[in-house]
Image (tube, helix red, strand yellow):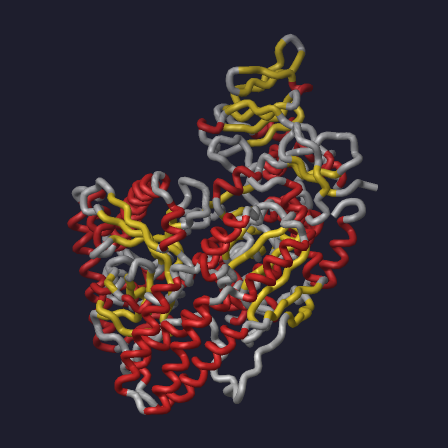
Amino acid sequence: MAGRVVLLDDERSAPVNAPWAGPLLALGARLARQPQPDPESRLVVAVTVPTRDLAAALIATGWTLTRPVTAPPAVEEVLETLQPSSPVRMVASRELVADRFVSYEVVGGRPRVRVGASGWLLEKVDMLLPAPGLPATRFRRTGLTLPGSLVTSVDRARTWLVAQVACGADVVLVGTKSCLAAEMAVRPGRGNLGVGHNSFGEILRPDDGSRSAWGSAILPAARFEEAVVPPEARLAVLDGSSAIGWLNDLTTDFSVAIIDRSVADDFAAESIIQLRSMGGTPVSLYRAWVAAADRCRGAGF
Amino acid sequence: MTGMSQIADRYQAAEDLARGIVELHAVADEAGAYLDVALKRLIIQLRAEDPEIWQDLLMVARQARWRLATNPAPAAFRSDDDELLVALLAACRRRRLAADEQTQLLLEDLARRAEEAHARDRPTGEVLLESLRDLDYQACVVITASGRAQNATRSWFNDLGISVPVIRGSFREQADVVEQAYAVGSPSLFGPSLLTAPRANALTYVLPSWVQDRSLPKSSLADYAEGAIRPERKIFKIGREPLLDDPPAVVEVQLVPAPVWSRQAPPRPPRADEVLARKLLLGGGLAIMLDQDGEHIRSLYPRCPAGERVELADVSAVTVGSYLVLREGATQSAMLYDWAIDLLGNRGPHASRSQEEWKGALQAQLDRLGTAAVVRALARAGVKRADRAAAWTSVTMVRPQRDRDFELLLEWLGLPIQPHFELATALRRARLQASQDIREILEDAVSSADLSELERDGFLRFELDVLGFRSIIATRVLAISPNIEPTHHHDVRRPFEDWGAQWLE
């Protein structure tokens, strides 16, 4: 049975018990299992917290670790259709290599793949995916982390590598950018599993403009006019009053509005109520919540 | 960033209080009770009178009563109340001259009670001090409802050598969760956050027993939320209640001093060159008219990390306590517009002409058909935010938010989509750039300024070295008028002098 949810400031800190984090992870997971809403409608969940810290990151993490991971095509299949010079993402020796595909040839009886300036034996290549449109500014080699306690506890260790290489901002976090970015260094985990803990950043992989593969986006709440919500985003997590002001204009299937109860003004709450009264259908989450909360004390969430 | 154990403590405290009990200590306060009764009697007496001439006196008297309810410090530490008392006595003397005998007696009574209450120490303070002493001054915090009460209480504690922290309004300034918090004043003065996001394991409100409102506040979401937080309340009466002969029936429960908004002219729709706006009273003796349909206004967040303190906030998010950044004597938007046109270089004049053309056409339709008809027609044509039609004629709104709305609008006006679409989009981008540039300049100025002065006085002036942008003020919103008035375009967001907020906190 997996241990309790813990949080660590960074890899050197001692884990601190965080029973409060479980239901937030569970909320994200719950939404990831929801069937798609009808076209023209979306599900908005408003949740209040005594302090905003880490709530957005936890909800997004629960979602990301529950969303289905698509099995990658076999390397040989991909090789058949790859055009030379097209950008690719490749996993070899626990590294993610993003660069141009050069060639595939058999040298001395051994098949080799050349990507960018280097070559790999085919047998060492775990994954190869076309990355059409990937700009050269994102070409790099990145070491891939091992799956940690949280990932393992929800049975995602096997698909961890595939998830690390998948690219698409399926979830966006909207709030004070510097706060959210700083929180990416925190590590959520499960005690008692004897493995390390991945940071939020490793699990969510927010796009910072230079990553070769990303899984989320962090958008500054105050600049709605400038912000581009990725078209593939399915969940928007809105952290704070300014972010909640985006609700009217968002079109993601799911939105979670996080209301910080320690903030004096009621603007966030009022926006939600207004939205609700403009033609929303209230949905009861209670039963689902209780079940989820119970589950988070056990294995998985 | 908040530490992991601090976060856990906050969640725990919230859970404990949600299931627990909040205490209210209603302290007998003879002097305050007499003042309260005297004021209520006067208000009843004045019901038949013209409210405008009595406005000043009542505002000062209400402020005096407010301070009695919220400031626990003894008289020696409430010396800035002298000014208030002087103003009240003077107002009573002035009004007595033209008043009838009954009213004269009531005015004399009010003046006398105010003097007595001013001179005596506060029973709420005595009870507070005793409670803190019982805890040995450890692991507790005092929360006051106003900055004035906070300063007075801090001075008082310093004098006694007590190191209990004194914070204002909410728990925000306090990072750790303590054992016991004492809030001085009635629960509704502090809002729901004290109860729903406590940073203490136990919460007690200390107030004079003549304050009638003892309700626990709840957030607007509480009625709709599953699992809303509603702690139990236990009231303790402390001290001997004074005997009041013939206390008046409850006249007004509102304790917080509120400005009296001038009697509104009969409502009328705005003319072509007007918009609907509300008056905001600001710190520093200023006020502005804030347009209701405007999208953003530059706001200051002293608590945010440096570099993120100046942001464009939604106009509807502006509340009492928000800080606004304004240009003295003129608005920022005119300057932003010019700056943006400049940034466009050669295309600037074309963009300017394009704006005039399509906005002129829209204005002509609004004049001809009336706003409501235009909104309906646009909505029928498929424009999603047709309700914004009138706002789109303003200089500050370069073009409709949504691309499709803009295209449909241009079609409806009988204008070609290009070059208007492209020019307006370029202008919007330039305006954003200009806005960002200005924001950086402001952030610079703000990071080197002493914001504690702003928090204390509600007003701060920055002198900048940028052309056209010399004097910038940051000011706290003290009150927002419930009345919406048509206001000329040019007068919107332009700060002007208004001492209507003089006797607000």
Residue depicted at x 74% and y 54%: A292
Q: Is residue A121 above or below residue A229?
A: above
Task: Examine the image and state in which quarter residue B216 appears.
Answer: bottom right
Residue depicted at x 29% and y 61%: B285
Residue B57 coordinates in the image, percent (x, y): 34, 76
Q: Is residue B180 above or below residue A155?
A: below
Res A246 seen here: no
Q: Most extreme residue toward the top, as rendered?
A: A108
Residue depicted at x 48% and y 84%: B251
Q: Is residue B182 left or right of residue B154?
A: right
Quadrant position of the N terminus of chain B in the picture: top right
Q: Is residue B192 above or below residue B42?
A: above
- Which is nearer the eye, B401 or B9? B9
**Total numbered labels placed on residues in the image:** 0
- Which is nearer the eye, B342 or B14? B14
Q: Is residue B377 left or right of residue B165?
A: left
Task: Examine the image and state in which quarter residue B24 appears.
Answer: bottom right
Res B304 seen here: yes
Residue A175 coordinates in the image, percent (x, y): 50, 48
Quadrant position of the C terminus of chain B in the picture: bottom left
Residue A298 coordinates in the image, percent (x, y): 80, 47
- Which is nearer the eye, B252 or B307? B252
- Which is nearer the eye, B38 or B171? B38
Task: Examine the image and state in which quarter residue A76 appears.
Answer: top right
